[in-house]
Amino acid sequence: MKKFNVAVVGVGAVGVEMLRILKERKFPVGKLKVFARSERDIYVDKDSYHVLKVDHHGFKNIDIALFAGTEGEKGAAVTYASSAIKQGAVVIDNGADFRMEKDVPLVVPEVNPKDIKKHKGIISNPNCSTIQMVVALAPIQKRLGLKRIIVCSYQAASGAGRSAVKELMAQSKAVLDGKTVKPDALPQQIAFNVFPHIGGFQKESYTSEEWKTVKETHKIFHDDKIKVTATCVRVPVATGHSEAVYIETKKAMSVSKLQNLLSKSAGIEVVDDPKNGKYPLPINAEGKDAVYVGRIRKDPFVKNAYWLWVVSDNLRKGAALNAIQIAELLIK
Ligand SMILES: NC(=O)c1ccc[n+]([C@@H]2O[C@H](COP(=O)([O-])OP(=O)(O)OC[C@H]3O[C@@H](n4cnc5c(N)ncnc54)[C@H](OP(=O)(O)O)[C@@H]3O)[C@@H](O)[C@H]2O)c1
């Protein structure tokens, strides 16, 4: 089997998960180079990796460069992607910087795999909250057509990186010890709190995270007529984003047929037996690959309108797993 030389840039919350998933899925890695801001050895589970200090010349002979590095507000790909491409690599980027560029495909392999063919060196991974939502909605979009999406997200601390998880844990302990806490990595106290503030405030008082949900959904579904609107909320969960998704469709379908349609669709697991206490939960999604969908029900007052509760591991399907699935498509 042909092997491919792979670089992973960044070993934070997403980068570590990438190393784990490359191994788990037996990606045909020839040479592996791991980069971050400083040289050191790290352990992921029981495997040790030598991390090199990233520089512009490190991508020689690399076939695929998986970027999961932050650099201030931006991704490390802003600085290093062009060097990696010049040296022959295809870049798969987790950052938000290139997602909306015309020549950059924004790919979720279960939804729009063919878009990958249009790449000119960079392929972008969508935002974590967008990925799980479009995986859940793609079969509905295909079968019934989507007119409108209203989504409220309940996003885990790890969506803001490893420092936000540390802050959740440290603040929780401090509050339990009766101490006062001061937010640092996140804009508000995360322990025993929720706040509707992910990213910066932008046009029409929506946050950047909320606009990502709108624009990325349009790009992935190739349809900017779908009326998408979002409220994104940070919650004191370590890993696993949850979303209450309300949709209006062009055609109708019974709830049981909808459950059946989703349960047969790629990447989705339906957990929908609320009377027996079964519905998707972030604690059950952590470490798993699927997008879990439950609480599927009709709006009794509006024609062709439904609610879904969608949960997935933001570090896996929302980031690292989706990127490696793109790499798998690429080498096919
Ligand atoms: N967390 C999520 O759920 C999620 C989901 C989708 C997309 N993303 C995106 O994925 C990327 C990584 O996020 P994360 O959550 O893993 O962040 P993180 O936990 O804060 O880790 C950031 C990593 O980036 C490295 N880094 C910082 N500056 C760098 C530079 N100049 N060059 C190379 N590497 C550099 C850090 O290196 P050191 O280890 O040496 O400090 C660290 O390994 C971001 O672009 C983020 O927007 C994250």
Image (spheres, rainbow, N blue to C red):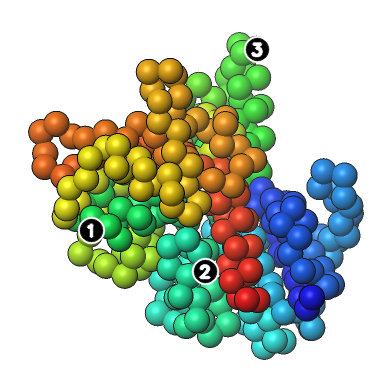
Q: Going from the N terminus, do you reach mark 1 or mark 2 first?
A: 2
Ligand 1 closer than 8 Å to the CB at disc 3? no
Of the residues under marks 3 and 1, which one precedes in the sequence?
1
- Residue at left 74%, top 64%? 27
- Residue in the picture at 30% in, 60% down: 142
User: Which of these two is toward me, 200 or 3?
Assistant: 3
User: From what the image shows, is residue 100 above or below residue 46?
Assistant: below
If the image is split into quadrants, where does the N terminus sit? bottom right
In this rendering, which labeled residue sits more in front, label 3 or label 1?
Answer: 1
Q: In which quarter of the image is residue 191?
A: top right
1 and 2 marks in contact (CB < 8 Å): no
Cβ of disc 1 within 8 Å of ligand 1?
no
Q: Residue 124 carries which label?
A: 2
Measured Cα–Cα span from mark 2 to mark 3: 43 Å
Q: Residues within 10 Å of mark 1 (few under 14, many from 20)?
A: some
- Crowding near pointer 3: few (<14 within 10 Å), some, many (20+)? few
- The numbered mark at residue 177 is 3
Residue 145: image tag: 1
Name above or below for residue 49 compared with residue 291.
Answer: below
Quadrant assignment, res 253: top left
The image shows residue 58 at horizontal and vertical percentages of 79, 77
